[in-house]
Image: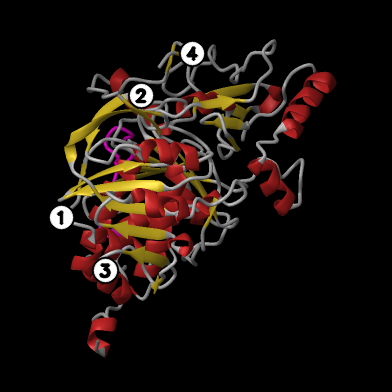
Amino acid sequence: MSLATLTKPWAATSYGFLDASAKRELRRKMLKAVAVPGCQMPYASREVPMARGWGTGGLQVTLTLANPGSVIKVIDQGADDGVNAASIRRFVSSVSGAAQTWDTLDASIIQSRHRIPEEILRENQVLVLQVPDPEPLRDVESNISIARQMHADADYGKLWLTLYEQIVRKGRIMQGASYPALVNGRHVITPSPIPRWDVPKLHMSKHLTILSAGREKRIFAVPPFTRVEPLVFSDRPYLVEDHAGLTCQRSGLSGFFMNELPMDGGGSRFEVSDSNLGIKAIRRTEGEPDGIGDTWYRNGEYSA
Amino acid sequence: MLSVAPPDAAEIRCNAVFEALLWAVSRPGETQLLPAPGMAGIIETLIDLECTAYAEGEELRARLAATGALLTEDIGQAGYVFVDSLMDFEAWLPAVNRGSALYPDVGATLVAAASHGRGSRLRLTGPGIAENRDILIDVPAGFWDLRAQLSAYPEGFDLILVDGASAIAIPRSTHVEVL
């Protein structure tokens, strides 16, 4: 063994920003996370040129997966043109040479903050969700050692209690985003703050979902064709947001998840949250080929 | 503006091996193609000085040692186990680290050579498989029974079976039925 065999030629930067040892660690943990669906795996969470809490977990996963042939889509609350989404997409592309896209159907890796696109993802696509708080038990158990024991025992009674108390106090389940869901019948996850509308899209899906929390240094995954069941009571069915009857003021789309824009005088108007779907619909009204793929929701009903 | 540093040969290999392994674990029983035959690529992609590894065979041990990993003689200490054959599995399989319900991530990854497309017929069910998937794997009789006995999910070990450049993964979440 010589010094030359232990070192590599000098390079100004590493491909994909992260150094080789960071990528190896992430790769090991990602494989473990997929092998035990929904179980939170700790990882080191390296520094990236972005503040923790702005998608560093997702960014590290994307950088580890990316190669020059990848096509990257990044969305922030459904929009490709938000500052956070655009800067992450540009950064990934500039350090990996991966192509950028806004089109869900063209992307090989989709990094997302708080939404899952409305078009059905294919079996060779990876959805990377940025997770602010990966621990579903945090609100009911602040001690992470006890929370770990509760996961080990599959002791999720306190989560059911929270949902029950919401029904008693308000008459319905108030939990909007981060709705707790049971993965593979064993581990409860918080599916990142995606709306209730998006949780069914994880159930028995064709694509792979990786959820990564950079600040909390935990990674977990939902493999394809895995059961993801929101916690519900048998006499209180799971309800998604009541957006089926809303129409987008810009694109004319209806039956999809909408952003509500408050107006002067107290009213509000709505715009479709998946911005690229809206763009495709506007193209369609202008007579161009739209290229809208199959969607999970049809006429406001989940039907995939 | 940053100029893109092109990936070096090692990164291209590791990225391709990782992608194959990630899809293999995501879709248990489905054959994925590694860029080169054998376990060398898997070692290069996953193992470094943060790992404790166990291997049989001088060549594999030398490869693991070159990564800086801690080579152990005690299979129970290893996070990554590389074996050329599953023939005498009764002797060592019960000792493989299966983690605990508290720390499922400690459970080992077992990389073994096994012929695909012949041997016993298995029916796989579980995450990553739409209904069920039937595969042929040349693994000695009794291995799957012992695996089921040893693993109380989420405890268990994750299996990667390598045949030349083909890899099939059977993670602990997969239920194996011998037909």
Which residue is labeled 3 in the image? B3
Is residue B70 rendered to the left or right of residue A135? left
User: Residue at 58% across / 57% down in the picture?
Assistant: A215
User: Range of the magenta residues?
Assistant: A95-108
Viewer-nearest of labels 2 and 1?
1
User: Residue at 25% across / 86% down in the picture?
Assistant: A1
Chain letter, disc 2 residue? B
Tell me, yes or no, if residue A88 can be seen here: no
What is the quadrant of the C terminus of chain B in the image? top left
Which residue is labeled 2 in the image? B130
Neighbourhood count class around disc 2 (C-alpha, 10 Å): few under 14, some 14–19, many 20 upward: some
Where residue B51 appears, as percent x and y from the top left, is 42, 67
Residue A300 is labelled as: 4
Where residue A298 appears, as percent x and y from the top left, is 42, 13
Residue B130 is one of the magenta-drawn residues: no
Which residue is labeled 1 in the image? B37
Earlier along the polypeptide chain: callout 3 or callout 2?
A: 3
Q: CA distance from mark 2 to mark 4?
A: 26 Å
- Secondary structure category for the residue under label 3: loop
Viewer-nearest of labels 1 and 4?
1
Tell me which amino acid carries mark 3: Ser
